[in-house]
Image: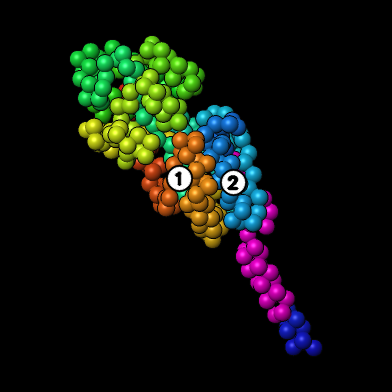
Amino acid sequence: MRRLTAFGWACAALLSISGQASAQSEYPSHPIRIVVGFAAGGATDVAARILASKMSEELGQTMIVENRPGASTTIAGETVAKSDPDGYTLFMAGNANAVNAVAESKLPFDVLRDFAPIGISVTSPSVLVAHPDSGFKTVADLVAEAKANPGKIMYASAGAAAVSHLAGELFAYEQNVKMTHVPYKGSPPAMTDVLAGRVPIMFAPISTALPHIRSGKLIALAVTYPQRLDDLPNTPTLAEAGIKNFDMSIWFGLVAPKGTPPDRIAKLGAVMQKTLVRDDVRKALAIQGIVPAIGQGPAAFTRRMEVDIEKLRAVFAATGMKMSE
């Protein structure tokens, strides 16, 4: 009788272990949320929805994009950081979180400590553009004028601490010049004034600037990207223009709460990479001026965040820049 009882317990234990293994192998068994810290319709939201739609096909399970805008993505980030680490709640993290890590002293989470990175998903290059009446044909022209007349040159941005603002500050910092920041409430009104010649230059998203460059209404001085862009093959990178290690492109990628099982992180990363190389995904992203980040896994994500935080910390310290500027 004792032997039968022991045998029964052993069978139950084996069944339990088998059930646990089966549960692990069945991930995902229900929908996955991707929380985005921006309103619907923006570039981050659009890219997240493109990825979610196609990753769902690969995973055999629905991925839902949930918008939680506010506090420069902090609300969305906190939601995910405090979620169960089970692989069912993800966050689109990126530049804004690097900015917050430097500019905000009291954050409810640490972007490097409290998340398990899955990988960089996409990047969106910016281009330094000038109005034709500005007289700037090259980056060298701009730098020469800025050195000769400190503070005279104005540059437009989408708002305080937006990538277009940070790019301008980093440019001025790297070239040891002074320019005057003119913030707007978003890229469209900023671009309107640049097109009108009221502000001579801007670090603009490629999707916003490209039509005006092609029409001759703006001059492309350089792209803020490691290599030249297919859409602007004759426009040099800032590195080619003499400014090394300058990459202020917009980027974001998927992270999960810290403690998420490594096998689930690996599965999500593999599916994301498989999705990013699909022709239909690449074409859909290209329409938005977005480039898939092929092969940029957890280590690349962490390194990019660390580099951006270090770079921004130097700029904030040197310029005294604040989020409210």
Q: Write the residue at 44% across / 19% down.
A: 191
The magenta segment: 10-35
* Residue 112 is covered by the magenta coloring: no
Colouring scheme, one of rainbow, by chain, secondary structure, one colour:
rainbow
Q: State the image quarter where residue 37 is shown.
A: top right
Q: From mark 2 to mark 1, how far is it between C-alphas?
A: 14 Å
User: Please, which residue is most extreme toward the front here?
Assistant: 215
Residue 304 percent location from the top left of the image = 38, 43
Q: State the image quarter where residue 310 is shown.
A: top left
User: What SS does tag 2 mark?
Assistant: helix
Which three-letter amino acid code belongs to the residue tagged 2?
Answer: Ala
Residue 90 percent location from the top left of the image = 57, 46
Q: Write the residue at 52% across / 34% down.
A: 43
Q: Which residue is the site of mark 1?
A: 292
Q: Which residue is the site of mark 2?
A: 52
Q: Give the left or right position of residue 204, taking residue 65 as reference.
A: left
Tell me the tag on residue 29. Answer: none
Q: Main secondary structure of the magenta part?
A: helix
Which three-letter amino acid code belongs to the residue tagged 1?
Answer: Pro
- Other-residue count near label 2 (Cα within 10 Å), few / some / many at <14 / 14–19 / ≥20: many
